[in-house]
């Protein structure tokens, strides 16, 4: 399977997850979007040494994953994209910040190690939150929500159209890449003689095709903006979810839950 | 270069959202004024193609490695800077939403680092002036050389600016203990090499478009005439060497003299460079009553992670009870997962 086929597989998997029908899936997409943004802001706002304060934030997404029926492990393969840069930045902390901050028996843990762990956990938690949003919300609903939140129509329509064509183009290029490699066995990538023509040919054909596409859109009654099929009003349960989730995230952020829990067992 | 949410403080992320949002607003206004609704599907299809095209590996001759193409320069050369910028926003949004490549909160910063520099700086400072000039002379061959020069220079410059912004944003967010200068010295040369390869791949695609359909390229007037004597391969080689020298010089300059920048950004001369190197916000800054007041207000209101929470004397919170509590939280999270899995299985059996 080449890189593009993998990407297609990931897209299809997200679509499948978003098509399920749990209570979380049925919520208004705007409520889910705003709640996710609130969660991410609160999570990254933790102090770089506040590892124990950050831990309880895990409970929010874990609970929502279970309520929506999406296994937590499904999001972990995406960590391969998130972690490298976070690791590259965080890995230096233990070398530069060596002041011991915590004594665990005879082992002293330095501030750098704690800040590195905090940074990585923040990365994982934020990934879980945004993955959950996309795994429970189809792109059409999300675009409808973005329109409701007054994101410019041009941008939203462009997002929706591009998403549609990402699948088509990726599939086309996956076939082209396979065909190229079958004719040029043992080569790692596209050779320099075909650098321009490989993508260029598809680019020219597609740009021409886009004109026909616009004509067909007009014939189907397109005028300036799309009509979203499943847009529905923002109801009381949506409001309750939004308010409730933000309240819980605020409590997890500002009440030292881990320390309180621990003090029940340790004096 | 896609930044994850964890690498940014909320205040920095919000600032970048405002900056990118304003440019997006201006771009949308310009496109609406131009009134070319038929451009929308072209933008969408081209954006989708660039998205997929960035996954193609191009073998770099003479080395075992491979490179990719530079989306921002390609889109602005084909669609113009405004339409290119909006298309890049959409590409970055899809990468962030479906592939976790870059965070939702960091989207504003990623748009700035990759789309703004690539489309606006690359177009107005590099592409348009070079394509409008008479550099390399007249004729088709000269035009081709100009395309290569503009692509390579544009990609190198915009990637250097993007890498610089990543370092600046991360450092301002107080995420890394790595000194600003060292971080910069790490990022800039890597992106110089990436920029060179991306520039050459982008140039190859744009040259192909130029050969077949020159009218599709922005700011290029199709010429018919005799070929110039300069061979394209020679031009590419010369340009690569120039870009390497210029970019390498800039990177070295940036890494060997980080104090000037840090002085400008973070502190005054009296406080001393060495104290500022660690980028510990509590150690730098001009002390004055106004600054103290501002600091007090910021401490009361700020979400910036470098301040401990107001009534928390030990920012670490790493008492033994905290550690035990964290372990308990992890246990509870695991239990929730197990319980969820158990109920799902039961449900599916029914």
Image: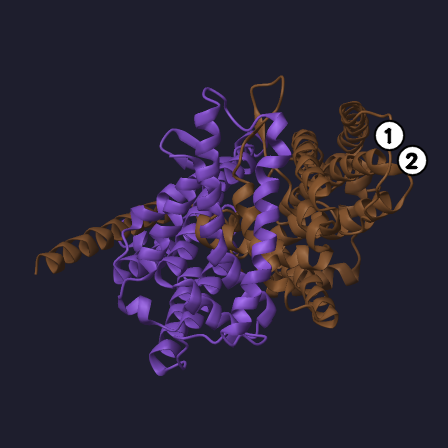
Chain colours: A purple, B brown
Q: CA distance from mark 1 to mark 2?
A: 8 Å
Instruction: Residue A110 in the image: state x and y as whole percent.
Output: 49, 34
Which numbered disc flags the more N-terminal residue, 1 or 2? 2
Given the image, what chain letter belongs to the residue carrying mark 1?
A: B
Q: Nearer the viewer, residue B224 or B239?
A: B224
Left or right: B50 in relation to A74: right
Mark number for residue B179?
none
Left or right: B173 in relation to B325: right
**Residue that badge 2 annotates:** B137
Instruction: Residue B340 in the image: state x and y as whole percent.
Output: 21, 56
Closer to viewer: mark 1 or mark 2: 1
Instruction: Residue A184 in the image: state x and y as whole percent.
Output: 48, 23
Q: Is residue B197 visible?
A: yes
Q: Determine whether the residue tagged by mark 1 lies in a helix, strand or loop.
A: loop
Mark number for residue B228?
1
Asked if the residue at tag 2 contacts the one at tag 1, i.e. Cβ–Cβ closer than 8 Å, the answer is yes
């Amino acid at each position: 399977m080449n890189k593009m086929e993998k990407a297609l597989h990931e897209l299809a998997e997200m679509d499948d997850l978003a098509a399920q029908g749990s209570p979380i899936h049925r919520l208004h997409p705007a409520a889910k979007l705003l709640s996710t943004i609130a969660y991410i802001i609160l999570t990254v706002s933790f102090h770089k040494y506040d590892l124990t304060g950050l831990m309880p934030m895990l409970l929010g997404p874990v609970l929502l994953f279970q309520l929506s029926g999406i296994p937590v492990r499904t999001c972990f393969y995406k960590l391969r994209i998130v972690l490298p840069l976070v690791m590259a930045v965080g890995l230096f902390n233990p070398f530069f910040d060596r002041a011991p901050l915590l004594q665990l028996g005879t082992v002293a843990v330095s501030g750098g190690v704690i800040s590195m762990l905090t940074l990585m956990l923040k990365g994982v938690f934020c990934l879980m939150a945004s993955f959950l949003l996309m795994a429970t919300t189809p792109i059409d609903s999300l675009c409808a929500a973005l329109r409701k939140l007054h994101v410019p129509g041009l941008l939203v329509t462009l997002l929706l159209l591009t998403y549609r064509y990402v699948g088509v183009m990726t599939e086309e290029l996956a076939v082209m890449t396979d065909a190229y490699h079958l004719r040029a066995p043992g080569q790692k990538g596209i050779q320099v003689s075909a650098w321009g023509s490989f993508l260029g040919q598809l680019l020219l054909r597609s740009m021409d095709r886009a004109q026909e596409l616009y004509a067909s859109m007009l014939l189907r009654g397109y005028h300036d903006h799309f009509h979203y099929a499943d847009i529905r009003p923002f109801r009381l349960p949506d409001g309750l979810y939004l308010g409730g989730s933000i309240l819980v995230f605020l409590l997890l952020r500002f009440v030292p839950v881990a320390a309180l829990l621990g003090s029940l067992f340790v004096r | 270069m896609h930044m994850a949410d964890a690498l940014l403080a909320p205040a920095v992320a919000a600032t970048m959202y405002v900056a990118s949002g304003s440019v997006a607003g201006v771009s949308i206004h310009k496109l609406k004024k131009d009134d070319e609704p038929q451009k929308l599907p072209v933008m969408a299809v081209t954006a989708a193609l660039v998205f997929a095209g960035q996954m193609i590996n191009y073998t770099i001759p003479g080395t075992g490695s491979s490179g990719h193409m530079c989306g921002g320069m390609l889109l602005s050369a084909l669609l113009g800077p405004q339409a290119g910028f909006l298309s890049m926003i959409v590409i970055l949004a899809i990468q962030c939403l479906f592939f976790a490549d870059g965070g939702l909160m960091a989207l504003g910063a990623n748009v700035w680092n990759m789309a703004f520099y690539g489309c606006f700086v690359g177009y107005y400072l590099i592409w348009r002036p070079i394509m409008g000039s008479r550099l390399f002379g007249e004729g088709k061959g000269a035009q081709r050389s100009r395309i290569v020069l503009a692509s390579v220079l544009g990609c190198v410059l915009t990637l250097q600016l993007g890498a610089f912004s990543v370092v600046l944003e991360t450092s301002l967010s107080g995420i890394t203990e790595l000194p600003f200068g060292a971080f910069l010295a790490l990022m800039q040369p890597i992106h110089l090499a990436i920029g060179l390869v991306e520039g050459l791949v982008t140039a190859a695609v744009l040259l192909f478009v130029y050969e077949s359909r020159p009218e599709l390229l922005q700011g290029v007037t199709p010429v018919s005439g005799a070929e110039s004597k300069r061979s394209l391969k020679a031009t590419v080689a010369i340009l690569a060497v120039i870009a390497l020298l210029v970019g390498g010089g800039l990177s070295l300059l940036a890494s060997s003299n980080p104090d000037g920048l840090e002085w400008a950004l973070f502190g005054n001369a009296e406080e001393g460079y060495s104290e500022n190197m660690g980028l510990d916000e509590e150690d730098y800054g001009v002390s004055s009553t106004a600054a103290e007041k501002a600091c007090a207000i910021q401490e009361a209101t700020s979400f910036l992670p470098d301040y401990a929470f107001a009534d928390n004397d030990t920012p670490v919170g790493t008492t033994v009870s905290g550690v035990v509590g964290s372990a308990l939280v992890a246990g509870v999270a695991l239990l929730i997962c197990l319980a969820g899995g158990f109920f799902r299985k039961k449900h599916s059996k029914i």
